[in-house]
Each structure stands twice: as structure tokens, then as C-alpha cells.
Amino acid sequence: MSDNLALGSPAAAGNVPSVVALTPKRLLAMTLVAMAFAVLPHLLPNYYVSIATQVLIFAVLAMSIDILAGYTGRTPLGHGAIFGTATYVTIYWATTLGGSPWTGMLVGIAAATTVAAIFALLAIRTSGVYFLLLTLALGMIVWGVCLRWTSVTGGENGLRGAARPAFLATHTAFYYLVLSAVAVVTFVMWRFVNSPFGLTLRGIKDSESRMRSLGYNVPLHLFVAFTVSGFFAGVAGAIYAMFNSFVSPSTVALTQSVAGLLMAITGGIGTLFGSFVGAAAIISLENFVSSYTERWLSVLGLMFVLIMVFAPEGIVGRIRMILDRRRG
């Protein structure tokens, strides 16, 4: 059987899970969550609305990481660089070049997708710790460029400028724009990981050699998955440019990649929607606990230890296990 079968080939029909349907229960749950997010600006002051906006943005970054970590078995440590590339390009376009912020977002997403494609070409033939270390090294290259290319990136001073249009100046208006964008992006990602192509990625995660023997072009599938994942990280980065109106080398640093990965792990790798829970948990700790103690990083570390000991599958993953046992 040829190794160059098209993406989503039915050669292994019956050997990968069936497509997950959007059942009435799932649709109801998604609707209730969307309604809860929609009423937040009417219940919370502007400061908390801003934090909720940040949670939505970083949930998209965490979900983009989960596409690789949870559905292909490749854990990346370079998505912070892809995320930050979109942020840099968006702000540079809107401020230094004086272009439209909307065009800047599109160019930023395109730049991030290009960086992701380059990363993918170099990383897809590795796995395990080698994949993790290679993506870490690639991300550090981007960080070094942003730090040293001062004529474009501003170096350590970064770039500052209002990339947000005037009609989105209020916290509430911008929150609803972000919520709408995140809802669309989340649905697209959910459809992607539950499509025949996404299910093939799960087959690659379970047994790469078996998928090769069945005729799937594994490197091509991994390349597409990495590039698509980078595209969504770029979307998050472009939105973050409007949210923060500032970018510096710390935006593309390793800590950004680690934060996104920890959000995905906290919520539950392979759950996708757990990224919202993980992002909310980490950003809440960062903003609320730090206001009471300077040792908030210790509290954050303790939380990760407890999750790894008592819920290694993440918060949402643990809830799913409990519900499945009760149904059983």
C-alpha cells in the first residue's frame, strides 16, 4: 500500500475512532457556557472584564497547543514564539507603518502561520523529548531575533501603540468582539480535531508505525497539524496585540510557551475545552493571589503538584472520568 495516500484516506476505516457528533446535550452545554460568558460584562467591573478577556485569548493559545500535545502526541515548546510573532507584526503594522489594525491582524496571522510551517518542516520527523527540545530551540531563535533586531522590534524596549480601533476602546465592547472571535475559532478547532483528519492524528498518536503501515502519510499529516495549530496560535497573538497594545521579547519568550502548555495540562490534555479552565485557573492565580502575597508563584507551583498527583488528566479530564464511571 502506498505511503503517499491523500490526507484523511479511508484506508484505515474502522481502525480509528468515529467522528464525534454534536449531540443535543453537547449543544446545550456549549450554549449555556456561551450564555455565561455573554453576561459577564453585566455582572463584573471593568478590571474583571479585562481579566476575562485575557482568559479567552490565552485559552485559544492553549487549545492550539492541545491540538499537537493532545491529539498528535507531540508536545511543543515553541508556540509562545508563534503567538508573539503575530503580536509583533500586528502592532508594527498598525503603529510603525500606520496601516489598518485589521490588515495588521491578517498579516500577523499570516506571519505566525509561516513561522509555524517552518517549525513544522524542521520538527515533524522527531518525537518525544527531541520534538520538545527542537521546538524550544526554534522558539529561542525567534526570541533572539526579537531581542537583537532593534530597528524593527525595539529590542528590550519593545513596541508600544494603540492597535485597537476607537469603537473598541471600552472593555465591554472589546470583550464581546473577543468572545465572538473565540467562539468561532473554538468551533473550528473542535471540528478540526473531530474530523476524519483529526481522528487520523489520534491514530498517529496511538501508533505511528501502524498508521504508516496502513498507508497514511504521517509526516504530511503532522506538518498540516503543526501549521494549523500555529495558525490558531497566531489568531490568539493578533487579538492579544489589540488587547495589550504592547509587545516585547517576553511575549515570544519560553515562559509564554510554558504558560500556554501549563494551561492546556491544567484543564486536560486532549480535551480542548479544558484550555478555558486551565487559562482561567492560571490567570486568576496570577492576578488575584499576587495581590495578597509575593509568593504567588509558590501557590501556582503547589496547584500544579496537586493536579499532577490527584488529577494527571487535568481538571476537565478528571470530571469526564467521574461522569463516565457513574454512567457505567
Image (tube, rainbow, N blue to C red):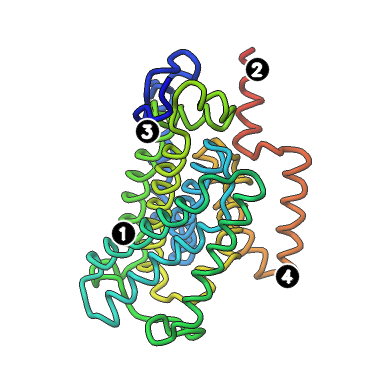
Q: Nearer the viewer, mark 4 or mark 1?
A: 1
Query: What is the CA distance from the residue labelled 2 to the residue labelled 1?
Result: 46 Å
Q: Nearer the viewer, mark 2 or mark 1?
A: 1
Q: Quadrant of the C terminus?
A: top right
Q: Nearer the viewer, mark 3 or mark 4?
A: 3
Image x and y of residue 248, in percent: 48, 77
Q: To which residue does mark 3 refer?
A: 191
Residue type (three-letter) at the residue carrying disc 4: Thr
Query: What is the CA distance from the residue labelled 2 to the residue labelled 3?
Result: 27 Å
Q: Categorize mark 1 by other alpha carbons within 10 Å: few (<14), some (14-19), many (20+).
A: some
Query: What is the CA distance from the residue labelled 1 to the residue labelled 3?
Result: 21 Å
Residue type (three-letter) at the residue carrying disc 3: Arg
Q: To which residue does mark 1 refer?
A: 110
Q: Nearer the viewer, mark 2 or mark 3?
A: 3
Dot 2 lies on which element?
A: helix
Above/below status of 180 relative to 199: below
Q: Categorize mark 2 by other alpha carbons within 10 Å: few (<14), some (14-19), many (20+).
A: few
Is residue 94 at least partly visible in the picture?
yes
Q: Say whether disc 3 or disc 4 marks the residue closer to the N-terminus.
A: 3
Q: Categorize mark 3 by other alpha carbons within 10 Å: few (<14), some (14-19), many (20+).
A: some
Query: What is the CA distance from the residue labelled 4 to the residue labelled 2?
Result: 40 Å
Q: Say whether disc 4 or disc 2 marks the residue closer to the N-terminus.
A: 4
Q: To which residue does mark 4 refer?
A: 293
Dot 3 lies on which element?
A: helix
Dot 1 lies on which element?
A: helix
